[in-house]
Image: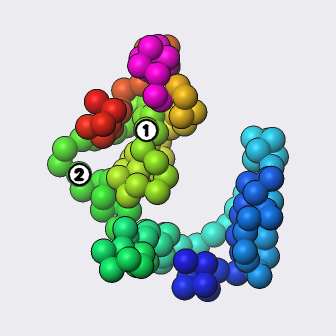
């Protein structure tokens, strides 16, 4: 996938950098550094047809295929939905795997509507008691579950 996308940079979790067979620039992420606030404005111009990300299909041929998702695609998914809506008062919780395409709605549904996005650890998600308590304690208002979790 890295070769196919011709990626120039890769962000890797600290401790996993030795697993990255990558010849470009490798940035090692530091969770603490990511948590620190930075008030430096980022000036980025972007158009609706710019690439937002590349999603890889499961690959019915045995080889995953990259599908280019534009900013317009993401906004259309979130804003043209006829099955839910969100506002700045909502609190989403991320329950899907980051590799699952439906997570796009969980993440961007929150972020593009000014809502909060809660990200929890796997052990809390898989413990009905802890998960239920988290939902109540944090007043989660938007939740998407696969049938396996439901």
Give coordinates of residue 115: x percent, y percent: 46, 37
Q: Residues within 10 Å of mark 2 (few under 14, many from 20)?
A: few
Q: Which mark is residue 11?
A: none
Q: Nearer the viewer, mark 1 or mark 2?
A: 1
Residue, x 40% and y 55% (percent of image)? Answer: 100
- Mark 1, other Cα within 10 Å: few <14 / some 14–19 / many ≥20: many
Choose top left, top right, bottom left or bottom right for residue 4: bottom right
Q: Nearer the viewer, residue 17 or 92?
A: 17
Where's the C terminus, which quadrant? top left
> Magenta region: which residues?
125-135
| Residue found 53% across the figure and 73% down from its top | 46
| Disc 1 + disc 2, Cβ < 8 Å | no
Q: Which residue is mark 2?
A: 81
Is 119 in front, or is 110? Answer: 119
The quarter holding residue 136 reads: top left
Image-based side of 82 in relation to 125, left or right: left
Q: Please, what secondary structure does the residue beneath circle 1 have?
A: loop
Work out which quarter of the rendered image holds the N terminus and state it: bottom right
The scheme the figure's colours follow is: rainbow
| Residue 96 image position (x, y, % from top left) | 42, 44
For image coordinates 19% across by 44% down, the residue present is: 83
């Amino acid at each position: 996938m890295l070769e196919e996308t011709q990626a120039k940079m890769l962000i890797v979790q600290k401790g996993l950098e030795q697993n990255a067979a990558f010849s470009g620039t490798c940035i090692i992420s530091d969770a603490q550094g990511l948590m620190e606030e930075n008030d430096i404005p980022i000036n980025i111009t972007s158009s609706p047809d710019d690439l937002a990300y590349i999603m890889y299909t499961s690959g019915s041929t045995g080889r995953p295929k990259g599908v280019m998702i534009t900013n317009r695609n993401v906004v259309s998914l979130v804003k043209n939905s006829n099955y839910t809506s969100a506002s700045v008062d909502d609190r989403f919780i991320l329950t899907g795997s980051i590799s699952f395409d439906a997570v796009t709605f969980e993440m961007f549904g929150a972020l593009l509507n000014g809502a909060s996005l809660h990200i929890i650890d796997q052990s809390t998600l898989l413990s009905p008691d802890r998960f239920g308590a988290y939902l109540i304690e944090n007043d989660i208002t938007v939740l998407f579950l696969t049938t396996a979790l439901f």
